Image (cartoon, rainbow, N blue to C red):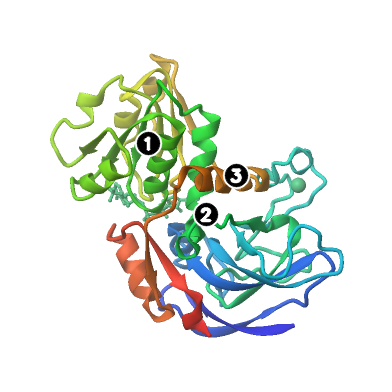
Amino acid sequence: MLTVNAYGATSATDPLVPLTIERRDVGPRDVMIAIRYSGICHSDIHTVREEWGKITFPQVVGHEIVGEVIETGAEVTKHAVGDRVGVGCMVNSCRECDECLAGDEHMCANGNVGTYNSTDVDGTTTQGGYATHVVVDQDFVLAVPEAIPYDRAAPLLCAGITTYSPLARWGAGPGRKVAVVGLGGLGHMAVKIAVAMGAEVTTISRTDAKKADALSFGAARHVATNEDGALRALTRTFDLIINTISAPYDVNAYLRTLRPHGALVNVGLPPEPLALRVGSLIGGGKSFAGSNIGSIRETQAMLEFCAEHGIAPETELITADQINEAYDRTVAGDVRYRFVIDAATLA
Ligand code: NAP
Ligand code: ZN
Ligand code: ZN
Protein backbone atom coordinates (compact mmCIF):
# COMPACT_ATOMS: atom_id res chain seq x y z
CA MET A 1 0.00 0.00 0.00
CA LEU A 2 1.12 3.51 -0.70
CA THR A 3 -0.07 6.44 1.42
CA VAL A 4 -0.61 9.51 -0.79
CA ASN A 5 -1.62 13.12 -0.29
CA ALA A 6 -5.11 14.09 -1.37
CA TYR A 7 -7.83 16.68 -0.87
CA GLY A 8 -11.22 15.38 0.19
CA ALA A 9 -14.55 15.75 1.94
CA THR A 10 -15.19 14.58 5.51
CA SER A 11 -18.90 15.46 5.46
CA ALA A 12 -21.52 16.82 3.06
CA THR A 13 -21.37 20.27 4.61
CA ASP A 14 -17.75 20.93 5.65
CA PRO A 15 -15.18 22.30 3.21
CA LEU A 16 -12.78 19.85 1.56
CA VAL A 17 -9.50 19.44 3.47
CA PRO A 18 -6.04 17.98 2.90
CA LEU A 19 -5.89 14.33 3.93
CA THR A 20 -4.08 11.11 3.04
CA ILE A 21 -5.47 7.98 1.37
CA GLU A 22 -4.12 4.49 0.63
CA ARG A 23 -3.50 3.26 -2.89
CA ARG A 24 -3.27 -0.50 -3.42
CA ASP A 25 -0.03 -2.22 -4.39
CA VAL A 26 0.45 -2.36 -8.15
CA GLY A 27 -1.07 -5.68 -9.26
CA PRO A 28 0.01 -7.62 -12.37
CA ARG A 29 -2.43 -5.73 -14.63
CA ASP A 30 -2.22 -2.34 -12.89
CA VAL A 31 -0.39 0.86 -13.62
CA MET A 32 0.55 3.48 -11.06
CA ILE A 33 0.06 7.02 -12.29
CA ALA A 34 1.72 10.12 -10.86
CA ILE A 35 -1.18 12.55 -11.27
CA ARG A 36 -0.27 15.88 -12.83
CA TYR A 37 -3.67 17.52 -13.34
CA SER A 38 -7.19 16.82 -12.13
CA GLY A 39 -10.35 18.55 -13.40
CA ILE A 40 -13.30 19.63 -11.25
CA CYS A 41 -16.59 18.27 -12.66
CA HIS A 42 -19.95 19.44 -11.34
CA SER A 43 -20.61 15.75 -10.57
CA ASP A 44 -17.84 15.95 -7.94
CA ILE A 45 -19.84 18.71 -6.25
CA HIS A 46 -23.23 16.93 -6.51
CA THR A 47 -21.51 13.87 -4.99
CA VAL A 48 -19.67 15.35 -1.99
CA ARG A 49 -22.65 17.56 -1.09
CA GLU A 50 -24.81 14.37 -1.16
CA GLU A 51 -27.20 15.96 -3.67
CA TRP A 52 -27.50 12.56 -5.40
CA GLY A 53 -27.68 10.52 -2.18
CA LYS A 54 -25.57 9.33 0.73
CA ILE A 55 -21.87 8.69 0.15
CA THR A 56 -18.95 7.21 2.10
CA PHE A 57 -16.72 9.72 3.95
CA PRO A 58 -13.94 10.62 3.86
CA GLN A 59 -14.28 10.92 0.11
CA VAL A 60 -11.75 12.10 -2.45
CA VAL A 61 -13.54 12.87 -5.72
CA GLY A 62 -12.17 13.76 -9.16
CA HIS A 63 -12.64 11.75 -12.38
CA GLU A 64 -10.78 13.88 -14.91
CA ILE A 65 -7.23 12.71 -14.35
CA VAL A 66 -4.06 13.02 -16.40
CA GLY A 67 -0.54 12.08 -15.40
CA GLU A 68 2.44 9.86 -16.08
CA VAL A 69 2.85 6.13 -15.68
CA ILE A 70 5.56 5.54 -13.07
CA GLU A 71 5.18 1.80 -12.46
CA THR A 72 3.60 -1.11 -14.32
CA GLY A 73 2.59 -4.63 -13.25
CA ALA A 74 4.25 -7.69 -14.78
CA GLU A 75 1.42 -8.38 -17.26
CA VAL A 76 0.86 -4.80 -18.42
CA THR A 77 1.19 -4.43 -22.20
CA LYS A 78 -0.88 -1.33 -23.01
CA HIS A 79 1.09 1.36 -21.16
CA ALA A 80 4.74 1.94 -20.30
CA VAL A 81 6.61 3.96 -17.69
CA GLY A 82 6.76 7.58 -18.87
CA ASP A 83 3.54 7.43 -20.94
CA ARG A 84 1.12 10.35 -20.67
CA VAL A 85 -2.18 8.79 -19.68
CA GLY A 86 -5.67 9.62 -18.47
CA VAL A 87 -8.36 8.13 -16.25
CA GLY A 88 -12.02 9.09 -16.48
CA CYS A 89 -15.17 8.16 -14.59
CA MET A 90 -14.67 4.40 -14.22
CA VAL A 91 -11.79 2.15 -13.20
CA ASN A 92 -13.22 -1.35 -13.72
CA SER A 93 -16.30 -3.34 -14.74
CA CYS A 94 -17.45 -6.99 -14.57
CA ARG A 95 -16.10 -7.85 -18.05
CA GLU A 96 -18.66 -10.68 -18.33
CA CYS A 97 -22.06 -9.10 -19.03
CA ASP A 98 -23.41 -8.48 -22.54
CA GLU A 99 -22.54 -4.77 -22.32
CA CYS A 100 -18.95 -5.35 -21.18
CA LEU A 101 -18.44 -7.99 -23.87
CA ALA A 102 -19.78 -5.52 -26.44
CA GLY A 103 -17.31 -2.86 -25.26
CA ASP A 104 -19.93 -0.79 -23.44
CA GLU A 105 -18.41 -1.14 -19.99
CA HIS A 106 -19.92 2.20 -18.93
CA MET A 107 -23.29 0.42 -19.08
CA CYS A 108 -22.07 -2.71 -17.23
CA ALA A 109 -25.05 -4.79 -16.02
CA ASN A 110 -23.31 -5.34 -12.70
CA GLY A 111 -22.42 -1.67 -12.29
CA ASN A 112 -19.01 -0.46 -13.39
CA VAL A 113 -16.56 0.56 -10.67
CA GLY A 114 -16.64 4.36 -10.52
CA THR A 115 -13.39 6.24 -10.05
CA TYR A 116 -14.66 7.43 -6.65
CA ASN A 117 -17.30 6.50 -4.07
CA SER A 118 -17.69 3.06 -5.64
CA THR A 119 -17.03 -0.42 -4.26
CA ASP A 120 -13.88 -1.78 -5.87
CA VAL A 121 -13.35 -5.46 -6.73
CA ASP A 122 -11.39 -5.87 -3.47
CA GLY A 123 -14.31 -4.45 -1.44
CA THR A 124 -12.67 -1.10 -0.67
CA THR A 125 -14.24 2.26 -1.58
CA THR A 126 -12.59 3.89 -4.59
CA GLN A 127 -11.07 7.35 -4.12
CA GLY A 128 -10.65 9.75 -7.03
CA GLY A 129 -8.26 12.13 -8.65
CA TYR A 130 -7.69 15.02 -6.23
CA ALA A 131 -4.53 13.16 -5.17
CA THR A 132 -0.90 12.74 -6.12
CA HIS A 133 -1.12 9.12 -7.35
CA VAL A 134 -3.66 6.53 -8.45
CA VAL A 135 -3.41 2.80 -9.24
CA VAL A 136 -5.70 1.62 -12.07
CA ASP A 137 -6.18 -1.54 -14.16
CA GLN A 138 -4.50 -0.99 -17.54
CA ASP A 139 -7.76 -1.55 -19.46
CA PHE A 140 -9.28 1.59 -17.90
CA VAL A 141 -6.31 3.84 -18.62
CA LEU A 142 -6.37 6.02 -21.76
CA ALA A 143 -3.44 7.18 -23.87
CA VAL A 144 -3.42 11.01 -23.99
CA PRO A 145 -2.04 12.30 -27.33
CA GLU A 146 0.94 14.66 -27.08
CA ALA A 147 -0.89 17.17 -29.30
CA ILE A 148 -3.25 18.00 -26.43
CA PRO A 149 -1.65 20.45 -23.96
CA TYR A 150 -0.90 18.59 -20.72
CA ASP A 151 -2.52 21.12 -18.37
CA ARG A 152 -5.72 21.26 -20.44
CA ALA A 153 -6.25 17.58 -21.24
CA ALA A 154 -7.88 16.44 -17.98
CA PRO A 155 -11.44 17.72 -18.61
CA LEU A 156 -11.63 15.60 -21.77
CA LEU A 157 -11.81 12.49 -19.56
CA CYS A 158 -15.34 13.39 -18.40
CA ALA A 159 -16.62 16.60 -20.04
CA GLY A 160 -15.09 15.59 -23.39
CA ILE A 161 -16.43 12.06 -23.61
CA THR A 162 -19.82 12.91 -22.08
CA THR A 163 -20.53 15.36 -24.89
CA TYR A 164 -18.69 13.57 -27.73
CA SER A 165 -20.68 10.37 -27.21
CA PRO A 166 -24.23 11.74 -27.71
CA LEU A 167 -23.07 14.09 -30.49
CA ALA A 168 -21.67 11.06 -32.33
CA ARG A 169 -24.64 8.80 -31.55
CA TRP A 170 -27.29 11.33 -32.61
CA GLY A 171 -25.37 12.28 -35.73
CA ALA A 172 -24.15 15.86 -35.22
CA GLY A 173 -22.58 16.76 -38.55
CA PRO A 174 -22.93 18.84 -41.70
CA GLY A 175 -26.50 20.00 -42.33
CA ARG A 176 -27.58 19.40 -38.73
CA LYS A 177 -28.62 22.15 -36.35
CA VAL A 178 -27.45 21.48 -32.81
CA ALA A 179 -28.23 23.48 -29.68
CA VAL A 180 -25.99 23.29 -26.62
CA VAL A 181 -27.77 24.38 -23.45
CA GLY A 182 -25.66 25.56 -20.49
CA LEU A 183 -22.13 26.80 -21.09
CA GLY A 184 -20.07 25.25 -18.34
CA GLY A 185 -17.50 22.47 -18.46
CA LEU A 186 -19.62 20.06 -20.49
CA GLY A 187 -21.35 22.74 -22.56
CA HIS A 188 -18.24 24.42 -23.87
CA MET A 189 -16.80 21.05 -24.91
CA ALA A 190 -20.07 20.16 -26.65
CA VAL A 191 -19.77 23.36 -28.70
CA LYS A 192 -16.18 22.72 -29.77
CA ILE A 193 -16.80 19.07 -30.63
CA ALA A 194 -20.10 19.67 -32.49
CA VAL A 195 -18.48 22.45 -34.53
CA ALA A 196 -15.57 20.13 -35.41
CA MET A 197 -18.09 17.48 -36.48
CA GLY A 198 -19.50 20.02 -38.94
CA ALA A 199 -22.82 20.89 -37.26
CA GLU A 200 -24.31 24.38 -37.07
CA VAL A 201 -24.26 25.16 -33.36
CA THR A 202 -26.44 27.50 -31.31
CA THR A 203 -25.49 28.09 -27.67
CA ILE A 204 -28.26 28.70 -25.16
CA SER A 205 -27.23 30.27 -21.88
CA ARG A 206 -28.95 32.27 -19.15
CA THR A 207 -27.34 35.55 -20.21
CA ASP A 208 -25.16 37.09 -22.91
CA ALA A 209 -22.09 37.03 -20.64
CA LYS A 210 -20.56 34.05 -22.46
CA LYS A 211 -21.66 35.11 -25.98
CA ALA A 212 -18.23 36.25 -27.22
CA ASP A 213 -16.65 33.02 -25.93
CA ALA A 214 -19.35 30.87 -27.52
CA LEU A 215 -18.81 32.52 -30.91
CA SER A 216 -15.05 32.11 -30.53
CA PHE A 217 -15.60 28.35 -29.96
CA GLY A 218 -17.33 28.27 -33.34
CA ALA A 219 -21.01 28.70 -32.45
CA ALA A 220 -23.06 30.30 -35.22
CA ARG A 221 -25.22 32.16 -32.72
CA HIS A 222 -25.88 32.61 -29.02
CA VAL A 223 -29.26 32.93 -27.33
CA ALA A 224 -29.81 34.29 -23.81
CA THR A 225 -32.85 32.84 -22.02
CA ASN A 226 -33.23 35.89 -19.76
CA GLU A 227 -34.57 37.77 -22.78
CA ASP A 228 -38.36 37.59 -23.13
CA GLY A 229 -39.55 35.13 -25.77
CA ALA A 230 -36.01 33.88 -26.52
CA LEU A 231 -36.97 30.19 -26.56
CA ARG A 232 -40.31 30.77 -28.31
CA ALA A 233 -38.44 32.44 -31.15
CA LEU A 234 -36.53 29.15 -31.64
CA THR A 235 -39.67 27.03 -32.21
CA ARG A 236 -38.96 24.10 -34.63
CA THR A 237 -35.29 24.99 -35.07
CA PHE A 238 -33.02 22.14 -33.88
CA ASP A 239 -32.37 18.55 -34.89
CA LEU A 240 -30.57 17.86 -31.64
CA ILE A 241 -30.25 19.53 -28.26
CA ILE A 242 -27.50 18.62 -25.81
CA ASN A 243 -28.68 19.83 -22.44
CA THR A 244 -25.97 20.22 -19.79
CA ILE A 245 -27.93 22.17 -17.14
CA SER A 246 -27.10 20.94 -13.64
CA ALA A 247 -30.42 22.15 -12.15
CA PRO A 248 -34.13 21.58 -12.96
CA TYR A 249 -35.30 23.37 -16.13
CA ASP A 250 -38.43 23.77 -18.28
CA VAL A 251 -38.11 20.70 -20.47
CA ASN A 252 -41.31 21.47 -22.43
CA ALA A 253 -40.00 24.87 -23.50
CA TYR A 254 -36.88 23.22 -24.95
CA LEU A 255 -38.80 20.40 -26.65
CA ARG A 256 -40.73 23.09 -28.56
CA THR A 257 -37.46 24.25 -30.15
CA LEU A 258 -36.93 20.85 -31.80
CA ARG A 259 -37.91 20.11 -35.37
CA PRO A 260 -40.09 17.05 -35.95
CA HIS A 261 -38.12 13.86 -35.16
CA GLY A 262 -35.59 15.91 -33.19
CA ALA A 263 -34.02 14.72 -29.94
CA LEU A 264 -33.34 16.44 -26.62
CA VAL A 265 -30.50 14.59 -24.92
CA ASN A 266 -29.82 15.24 -21.25
CA VAL A 267 -26.31 14.93 -19.97
CA GLY A 268 -26.87 17.35 -17.09
CA LEU A 269 -28.09 15.45 -14.05
CA PRO A 270 -30.15 17.66 -11.72
CA PRO A 271 -30.96 15.99 -8.40
CA GLU A 272 -34.67 16.82 -8.69
CA PRO A 273 -37.19 15.28 -11.17
CA LEU A 274 -38.30 17.24 -14.25
CA ALA A 275 -41.91 17.92 -15.27
CA LEU A 276 -42.31 16.48 -18.78
CA ARG A 277 -45.61 16.97 -20.58
CA VAL A 278 -46.00 13.97 -22.88
CA GLY A 279 -47.80 16.16 -25.41
CA SER A 280 -44.51 18.00 -25.94
CA LEU A 281 -43.12 14.83 -27.52
CA ILE A 282 -46.03 13.39 -29.43
CA GLY A 283 -46.87 16.05 -32.02
CA GLY A 284 -43.48 16.10 -33.69
CA GLY A 285 -42.49 12.50 -32.88
CA LYS A 286 -39.69 13.84 -30.71
CA SER A 287 -37.30 11.98 -28.43
CA PHE A 288 -36.30 12.81 -24.87
CA ALA A 289 -33.12 10.94 -24.02
CA GLY A 290 -30.16 10.71 -21.69
CA SER A 291 -26.51 9.81 -22.11
CA ASN A 292 -23.91 8.67 -19.60
CA ILE A 293 -20.16 9.28 -20.25
CA GLY A 294 -18.95 6.79 -22.91
CA SER A 295 -17.04 3.54 -23.27
CA ILE A 296 -13.27 3.24 -22.94
CA ARG A 297 -12.99 2.62 -26.69
CA GLU A 298 -15.07 5.72 -27.46
CA THR A 299 -13.09 7.80 -24.93
CA GLN A 300 -9.88 6.88 -26.78
CA ALA A 301 -11.55 7.81 -30.09
CA MET A 302 -12.63 11.16 -28.58
CA LEU A 303 -9.04 11.90 -27.47
CA GLU A 304 -7.75 11.15 -31.00
CA PHE A 305 -10.54 13.31 -32.49
CA CYS A 306 -9.62 16.25 -30.24
CA ALA A 307 -5.92 15.89 -31.06
CA GLU A 308 -6.68 15.77 -34.78
CA HIS A 309 -8.98 18.81 -34.67
CA GLY A 310 -6.85 20.88 -32.29
CA ILE A 311 -9.55 20.87 -29.61
CA ALA A 312 -8.72 21.45 -25.95
CA PRO A 313 -10.83 22.56 -23.00
CA GLU A 314 -10.61 26.14 -21.70
CA THR A 315 -9.22 25.79 -18.21
CA GLU A 316 -8.26 27.78 -15.12
CA LEU A 317 -5.39 26.16 -13.25
CA ILE A 318 -5.75 26.27 -9.46
CA THR A 319 -3.86 25.15 -6.38
CA ALA A 320 -5.33 22.54 -4.03
CA ASP A 321 -6.21 25.16 -1.42
CA GLN A 322 -8.45 26.90 -3.99
CA ILE A 323 -10.72 23.85 -4.49
CA ASN A 324 -13.49 25.03 -2.12
CA GLU A 325 -13.61 28.43 -3.76
CA ALA A 326 -13.65 26.74 -7.17
CA TYR A 327 -16.68 24.68 -6.08
CA ASP A 328 -18.60 27.83 -5.11
CA ARG A 329 -17.63 29.54 -8.34
CA THR A 330 -18.72 26.51 -10.41
CA VAL A 331 -22.13 26.40 -8.70
CA ALA A 332 -22.48 30.15 -9.33
CA GLY A 333 -21.75 29.63 -13.05
CA ASP A 334 -18.53 31.62 -12.63
CA VAL A 335 -16.14 29.27 -14.41
CA ARG A 336 -14.43 29.75 -17.78
CA TYR A 337 -14.81 26.82 -18.38
CA ARG A 338 -13.21 24.17 -16.19
CA PHE A 339 -11.13 24.37 -13.04
CA VAL A 340 -8.09 22.10 -13.12
CA ILE A 341 -6.07 21.31 -9.99
CA ASP A 342 -2.30 21.36 -10.33
CA ALA A 343 -1.47 18.13 -8.46
CA ALA A 344 2.01 19.44 -7.65
CA THR A 345 0.29 21.63 -5.03
CA LEU A 346 -0.88 18.49 -3.18
CA ALA A 347 2.63 17.15 -2.69
P1 NAP B 1 -21.03 23.35 -14.88
O1 NAP B 1 -19.67 23.61 -15.37
O2 NAP B 1 -21.46 23.87 -13.57
O3 NAP B 1 -22.06 23.83 -16.03
C1 NAP B 1 -23.46 23.75 -15.89
C2 NAP B 1 -24.09 24.90 -16.65
O4 NAP B 1 -25.50 24.79 -16.51
C3 NAP B 1 -23.75 26.28 -16.10
O5 NAP B 1 -22.57 26.78 -16.63
C4 NAP B 1 -24.95 27.10 -16.53
O6 NAP B 1 -24.79 27.55 -17.85
C5 NAP B 1 -26.08 26.08 -16.52
N1 NAP B 1 -26.89 26.21 -15.30
C6 NAP B 1 -26.51 26.01 -14.02
N2 NAP B 1 -27.53 26.23 -13.18
C7 NAP B 1 -28.58 26.59 -13.95
C8 NAP B 1 -29.92 26.95 -13.67
N3 NAP B 1 -30.40 26.99 -12.43
N4 NAP B 1 -30.72 27.26 -14.73
C9 NAP B 1 -30.26 27.22 -15.98
N5 NAP B 1 -28.99 26.90 -16.30
C10 NAP B 1 -28.17 26.59 -15.30
O7 NAP B 1 -21.31 21.77 -14.79
P2 NAP B 1 -20.70 20.58 -15.69
O8 NAP B 1 -19.51 20.02 -14.99
O9 NAP B 1 -20.65 20.99 -17.09
O10 NAP B 1 -21.86 19.48 -15.47
C11 NAP B 1 -23.18 19.76 -15.90
C12 NAP B 1 -24.12 18.66 -15.44
O11 NAP B 1 -23.79 17.44 -16.10
C13 NAP B 1 -24.03 18.34 -13.94
O12 NAP B 1 -25.34 18.06 -13.47
C14 NAP B 1 -23.17 17.09 -13.91
O13 NAP B 1 -23.37 16.29 -12.77
C15 NAP B 1 -23.64 16.40 -15.16
N6 NAP B 1 -22.70 15.41 -15.71
C16 NAP B 1 -23.25 14.33 -16.32
C17 NAP B 1 -22.43 13.40 -16.94
C18 NAP B 1 -23.03 12.25 -17.68
O14 NAP B 1 -22.36 11.26 -17.94
N7 NAP B 1 -24.28 12.36 -18.09
C19 NAP B 1 -21.05 13.56 -16.90
C20 NAP B 1 -20.52 14.70 -16.28
C21 NAP B 1 -21.36 15.63 -15.70
P3 NAP B 1 -24.96 29.12 -18.26
O15 NAP B 1 -24.17 29.89 -17.24
O16 NAP B 1 -24.41 29.15 -19.62
O17 NAP B 1 -26.41 29.43 -18.21
ZN1 ZN C 1 -17.77 14.32 -14.54
ZN1 ZN D 1 -20.31 -5.84 -17.07
Q: Which residue is mark 2?
A: 147
- At which x and y percent is residue 77? 81, 59
Q: Name which quarter of the figure residue 139 lies in.
A: bottom right
Q: Earlier in the sequence, mark 2 or mark 3?
A: 2
Query: Quick check: can you spot residue 50?
Result: yes
Disc 1 from disc 3: Cα separation: 27 Å
Q: Do callouts 2 and 3 mark residues in contact (Cβ within 8 Å)?
A: no
Residue depicted at 20% across the width and 40% down the height: 224
Mark 1 / mark 2, whichever is N-terminal? 2
- For badge 3, the amino acid type reads Gly
Task: Say which of marks 2 and 3 sits in front.
Answer: 2
Give the residue type that dot 1 points to: Ala
Residue furthest left in the image: 228
Instruction: Give how far across and how far down residue 257 sits, in percent.
Output: 31, 25
N-terminal of the two: label 1 or label 3?
1
Depth check: give the residue in front, 280 or 286: 286
Of circles 1 and 2, which is in front?
Answer: 2
**Would you say residue 293 is visible in this rendering?**
no
User: What element does badge 1 sit on?
Assistant: loop
Pointer 2 local density, CA inside 10 Å: few below 14, some 14–19, many at least 20: some
Residue 161, how many percent across, how many down? 54, 47
- Residue type at the position of mark 2: Ala
Query: Picture coordinates of residue 55 (x, y %)?
Result: 56, 67
| Nearer-the-camera pick, 156 or 310 | 310
Residue that carries the numbered disc 3 in the rendered image: 294
Q: Is residue 202 left or right of residue 119?
A: left
Q: Nearer the viewer, residue 228 or 101?
A: 101
Q: Which residue is mark 1?
A: 275
